[in-house]
Image (tube, rainbow, N blue to C red):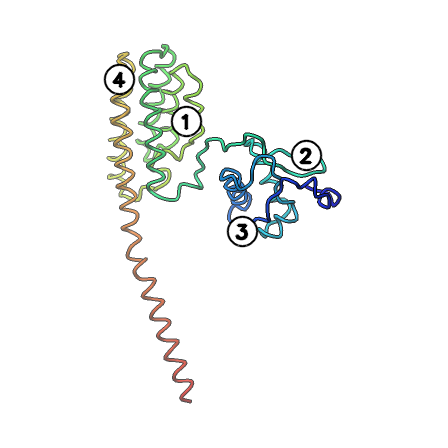
Amino acid sequence: MTTARARSNPRRRSNAVAPLAFRPLASRSLAHALVERLSAEIVSGRLAPGAQLPTEQELIATSGVSRTVVREAIAALRAEGLVVTRQGAGAFVAEGSRRPFRIDPVDLGSLAEVLAVMELRTGIEVEAAGLAAERASPADLRDIAAAYEAVGRAIGRGESAIDQDFAFHRSIADATGNAQFPRFLEYLGRFIIPRQTIRLATATAERTAYLRTIQKEHLAILKAIRARSVRAARAAMREHLSNSRQRYRKLAAERDEGQEPQARQEPQARQALQARQERQTREQRKV
């Protein structure tokens, strides 16, 4: 990234900061982790606009990653507009840089974070439903109805209907006539469907009943859009997504309850093993 000549010239590094105190990265998503660390330094101001990033060799030494990982991370930062690269000089923090908005599923590690994204989605999709009721063409209405029917067929086959559910919401976004709505949904991706992240482990009959409840809410949305009722379409979508958040909380709670017995057993097992080892040590000492 930086030549020996450039590194030896103090004027070329006049904007550089003191070496960053990175710890070696774990093996999971190395490039992503390095991007997050460098982004945090930039957004916080520790790496100011115009400052030179550590060289490839410095990042390799301090983070414990390969040259390929470093280059992938720099390329990602450049794509986000956070850094610029100069031939023979290295990478520098872009002037006026600020981190673009993004939601990465990797970062959704808690129930609260997932619910926050679902809440954001509600604000967008409620408006999308109202605009669809106002603007949908006959072809748009047919597409929404077809997507609704596809959900029903998937449920009838005993499937979770995740892709079909997403397609139903996507068809409503398409019907707004504003390309930003479907782009936003595609940006979030299918993980916004609660049962995508927490698999349904209930009996088949219970799962089917669960999905049919969702489908009834879909039908209410479809009917409101067909009736050209902006208010009813917004209300139906709001109720559907509010119920989705409640269902997600319930699924998460049931999942956690199912894991609790094992979580309690593991410390007990470790304690029993430790006790056995201590007894064996004492017996060996007696001999």
Q: Please tell me whether mark 2 sits on a helix, a strand or a loop.
A: strand
- Kindly report which numbered mark, 3 or 2, lies closer to the viewer in this rendering: 2
Q: Which mark is residue 86?
A: 2
- Kindly report which numbered mark, 3 or 4, lies closer to the viewer in this rendering: 3
Looking at the picture, which amino acid does disc 1 mark? Leu
Of 36 and 163, the residue lying toward us: 36
Real-space Cα distance between discs 3 and 2? 26 Å
Looking at the picture, which amino acid does disc 4 mark? Lys
Q: Quadrant of residue 248?
A: top left
Real-space Cα distance between discs 3 and 4? 52 Å
Disc on the earlier residue, 2 or 4: 2
> Outermost residue, bottom direction?
287
x and y, in percent, of residue 217 in the image: 25, 26
- Marks 1,2: beta carbons within 8 A: no
Looking at the picture, which amino acid does disc 3 mark? Leu
Q: Quadrant of residue 78?
A: top right
Real-space Cα distance between discs 3 and 1? 32 Å
Residue picked out by circle 1: 185
Residue picked out by circle 4: 223
Disc on the earlier residue, 1 or 2: 2
Residue picked out by circle 3: 25
